[in-house]
Image: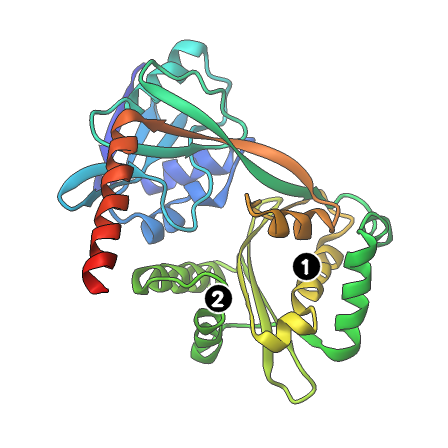
Amino acid sequence: MKVKLLKREDIDVRKWDECVLNSPNSMHYAMIWHLDAVSPGWQGVVYGDYMAVMPLPFERKARIPVILQPFLCQQLGIFSSEKLNIETLQSFYLMLKRNHPVLYNINFFNKPLLPSGLKLKRLPNTELYLNRSYDELKGAFSKNTRRNILKATKEVSISEEILPDDSMFNFIFENLRFSYSPSEQRIFRDIVLKSFKRKEGILLACRNNNGELLSIGFFVIHKNRITFLGSSSSKEGYVKQAAFLIFDKIIEKYSGRDSILDFEGSKNEGVARFYKGFGGKPTEYGQVSNRSFEVYKKGVEKARRLIKLFNN
């Protein structure tokens, strides 16, 4: 059997999703509903009768075909319900050997058997196994984390929302630490609404004593993995440490289960320290790139500098 590259419209949706669901490294990022939201032009590499699959997020940037890791999609790579031999794994990775730019994240489970011309970079993630009692998990929180949770508990109420409305989306986009572009806002909204329709989304909201929103956190539940996909806090929310209450609530809700809280990690030291404060442990995943991407990246950065100079 050989691997084959299929366009989105030629993919058997049921067989693709079953393959991802039955994989030991199953992640919602590789499910069709999520791929359609983050990368409408994606294609799929399929081995045999969907024994193994790998999504490829194709798109065009200034008419240039590229494979770029999509927004809100941390890890892709190969998903298989069976153990694959080295030759098959290499045939998947050969699909990434392109003349055009490639920047692609493979999941933590994948062996990076990359052909020449591709390079691998390790990126940080943070995970917390929840298969202990809440008291045991909380006992591993840092002193600073416990202190901030206690502070927030006295001044903030928290609730699990049935379905987010426009006011919540507006709050999220207006209070983001790093703003989303209009297209990123559409993608985020689409993912939230689709996950709620599938009963796989959780949105926790913190409010002050006047009922005003202070902080919102969004998570996707996929099998035994709870993935943090984003949060937003107002200035008052930061002062009252509302975000600490959101993660404390998620940990309490799913404690004692065979579940993993995936913080998604961060290269930012402050954010990484925040996750570590809840007892999160560092993990890694791989980022694959090629020479063409480096050239493309430099060209984009140069264009941005020229646009900024022109606008000034």
Q: Residue at x 39, y 22 (%)?
A: 119
Relative to 84, residue 130 above or below? below
Relative to 35, residue 95 above or below? above
The answer to whether one can see residue 11 in this image is no
Q: Tell me residue 57's x, y (percent).
A: 30, 40
Alpha carbon distance from label 1 to label 2: 17 Å
Tell me the kind of residue under disc 1: Phe
Q: Tell me residue 280's x, y (percent).
A: 70, 44
Relative to 237, residue 69 above or below? above
Q: Residue at x 52, y 60 (%)?
A: 199
Q: Residue at x 81, y 59 (%)?
A: 146
Q: Can you tell which quarter of the image residue 249 is in?
A: bottom right
Q: Which residue is mark 2?
A: 176
Q: Tell me residue 63's x, y (percent).
A: 13, 43
Q: In the figure, is residue 108 to the left or right of 16? A: right
Number of other residues with Cα within 10 Å of mark 1, as a class: few under 14, some 14 to 19, many 20 or more: some
User: Along the line of sight, which residue is nearer the eye, 51 or 89?
Assistant: 89
User: Along the line of sight, which residue is nearer the eye, 273 or 172?
Assistant: 273
Q: Tell me residue 85's x, y (percent).
A: 45, 11
Tell me the kind of residue under disc 2: Leu
Which image quarter holds the C terminus?
bottom left
| Numbered disc 2: secondary structure | loop
Which image quarter holds the N terminus?
top left
Q: Which residue is mark 1?
A: 247
The answer to whether one can see residue 96 in this image is yes
Q: Residue at x 49, y 32 (%)?
A: 107
